Amino acid sequence: MNKLFNNISVKEQAKLLKLLETSILYYKKDTTILSAVQGNIIGIILEGYAQIIRTDYNGNRTIIEELEENSAFGSSISSLSSDECEIIAKENTKVLLIDYDRIIQQEANNYSYYNQFIKNLLEMTTNIIDDKNDRIEILTKKTIRNKLLEYFNIYSKKHGTNIIYLPFSLTDFADYLAVDRSAMSRELKNLKDEGFINSKGRRITLLYR
């Protein structure tokens, strides 16, 4: 069950979606979900995986956010203020779109399932803030090595394991860290040669904890 509907029955979910006049859209892999969020729209990833990608005027590409299942995006909670940003489905993706103006209607507060929905949405928003703070910690590191180690440390603590499965390709990983892929690959090799990690494909095992 999507976290947005925690403690909300299937029957209540149907009432909630009707109340909020939501839309559910499906996107194929590598298609654009939104080039820019217009208006007060909130999107929820129900299934699949997408990325918010920024491409600057020089063609440099940076992954701003990862949008996995249960992730939320919108003009008020995501980095979408620039027309350089777009949301791309990285696999077949199902998205729930909600008009923010419908959410804040006072009359809807009479429904218990609506109040539970608001609680769930706030928890998801808190998680987004935590992820943004983690990203800031990574990007503020001065060297590629320290960016890699910070990413590994955050992942390890969040998932309680020393085995890391990168959710994206090495090219996307470099874009996420905002570094050159070739330089990052060299640093990964150095960390492996120095006994910090073992790696096989997207699987990385931390040896230094």
Image (cartoon, rainbow, N blue to C red):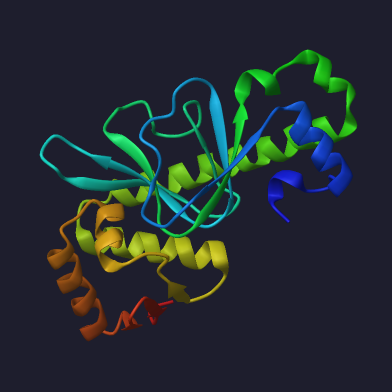
In this rendering, would 99 be left or right of 113?
Answer: left
Indicate whether 191 appears above or below 103.
below
Which residue appears at 16% of the width and 45% of the height? 60
Which quarter shows the N terminus?
A: bottom right
Which residue is painted at 31% across and 36% down in the image?
Answer: 85
Of 81 and 127, which appears nearest the observer?
A: 81
Give left or right: position of 111 versus 137: right
Q: Is residue 9 visible to the viewer in this orientation of the structure?
A: no
Instruction: Examine the image and state in which quarter residue 153 appears.
Output: bottom left
Residue 70 x %, y %: 60, 50
Please say if 112 is above or below 100: below
Instruction: Tell me residue 16's x, y (percent).
Output: 79, 34
Q: Nearer the viewer, residue 186 or 66?
A: 66
Tell me which residue sits at (29%, 28%) in the image.
83
Identify the residue at the far top of this view. 106
Above-or-below relation of 103 to 177: above
Please provide percent x and percent y for residue 44: 58, 42
The answer to which quarter of the image holds residue 69 is bottom right
Q: Give the quadrant of the C terminus.
A: bottom left
| Front residue of 202 and 143 | 202
Residue for point 85% across, 35% down: 113
